[in-house]
Amino acid sequence: METNSSQSAGNAVAHCDVLIIGGGPAGSTAAALLAQRGKQVVLLEKAHHPRFHIGESLLPLNMPLFDKLGVTQQISAIGMPKYGAQFVSPDHNKEVSVEFADAMDKSFPYSYQVRRSVFDHVLIKNAAAKGAHVFEGHRVTHVELNGADGARVTAQDEQGQTQQWHARYLVDASGRDTFLANKFDLKKKNSKHNSAALFGHFEGATRLPGKAEGNITIFWFDHGWFWFIPLQDGTTSVGAVCWPYYLKARKTSPTQFLLDTIALCPGVAERLKHATLVGEATATGNYSYQSKRMVGEGYLLLGDAYAFIDPVFSTGVFLAMNSAFLGAETIATCLDQPQRAAQAMRQFDTTIRNALKTFSWFIYRVTTPTLRDLFMAPRNVFRVQEAMLSLLAGDVFRDTPIRSRLSFFKGIYYLNNLMHLKRSFAAWRRRKLMIRDPRSEIAAG
Ligand code: FAD
């Protein structure tokens, strides 16, 4: 996709209100919203959609965002309905299923599993349809930030031609390429978390029956956990998220290592008994990171360009799109009411940090035996199970009564830890050892 318009620089420097680096869910969402507000938006994407991307499970609270973008029908046409999740733990000899319809707010009972190539294509086409000037095959190579004077951006197209833009405001939505965080040396490794993933797509996997067919299943195993994500086209995405040390021990191809790892988890092996892997498996170090800053004069960072924690609760696309909604609002304030810019930037920063913090507490503990016990024996005392389902549905940006219930859940967690002190200490020590970075550097997958 390439819009030939006055926004195309050619040899001269072109001007726009907002320039966005990256056309994933964060960049395309922000582009659509800002163009809809009448801003001159340029979106530069280095690849061509549809392009492969991992991250296929969406959350119920994504749905109102699709409504606001006007893409709900298109997403429902490509998505596999996901009404809930199933948890399978080898230590508990049972499976537990939960439904989003039982969350505190019952109005978001489902979401979708999607092929990201197709999903991201819908979003970037929507940005173009809303009036954003979209240039695919354009890699941003250089950025100069000039405070109140905006930014000068250089990009290279596939013919090696260099083009330049001057933007009043710059958005980094470059995903795990973390363009600005790298440029300004802002990226820091998450000292509390670390994991790596191996994944592939299978034909002929055994899915759950009936309405639960599209539900995600999480299987714990010795080295981490597996996702099992059924897609609408009949294939099923299966991935193992493991301690980095486990992945580093790999001596075979990613495909063989994935198959060997599946054999270590009887639950997944059973579901894939009659399945075949389509193509090759992929291995990726998804080292958890965060940028020291997400906003400054004339620029902000969205989605993975700011932070990535872990795929376990399928929060990536949801956080990317929410940061785009909040970011678009912030940018509009900065451009139209500069006297309110500082307050808007603070608000944006606080809201995103709080959401990440809320998810992080649970993500950091998801492989501990105590949290697993609680997930495998859900009880709705003080509506705590409903609150947990609200969290899993992504209900963290609204003013809802889930916070006090989540605090109560944390209390139960700490109490259980005390009751099984020896086991908890051993798990804490193992985790601390396992999350050390085997290469002591951040590596993007
Ligand atoms: P991206 O989707 O990565 O988009 C960034 C875009 O920027 C890309 O298209 C890229 O080509 C472009 N770009 C980069 N650099 C430049 C440049 N210099 N110039 C121009 N363009 C550039 N999330 C979920 O919600 N559900 C899941 O089930 C899930 N599973 C995951 C499993 C794994 C193993 C991993 C690693 C992640 C998973 N995620 C999941 C996270 C999810 O993939 C990301 O959080 C999400 O894609 C972030 O969206 P984004 O728009 O910020 O970045």
Image (cartoon, grey):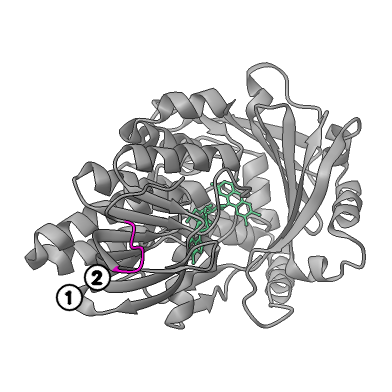
- Please give the residue where the numbered disc 1 appears in the rendered image: 148
Q: Is residue 271 left or right of residue 69?
A: right
Where disc 2 sits, the SS reads loop
Amino acid under label 2?
A: Gly
In x, y percent, where is residue 107?
A: 39, 26
Residue 35 rendering spot, x and y as whole percentages? 26, 46
In the image, residue 401 above or below residue 111: below
Screen quadrant of the C terminus = bottom right
- The structure residue drawn at horizontal position 33% and vertical position 55%, both measured from the top left corner, is 42
Magenta segment: 8-12
Residue marked by disc 2: 298
Do tag 1 and tag 2 residues touch (Cβ < 8 Å)?
yes
Between 243 and 222, the residue placed more toward the observer is 243
Relative to the observer, which residue lies in front, 202 or 85? 202
Q: Residue at x 30, y 39 (%)?
A: 130
Disc 1 versus disc 2: distance between alpha carbons? Answer: 6 Å
Which amino acid is tagged 1? Ala
**Residue 187 screen position, x and y as percent:** 49, 77
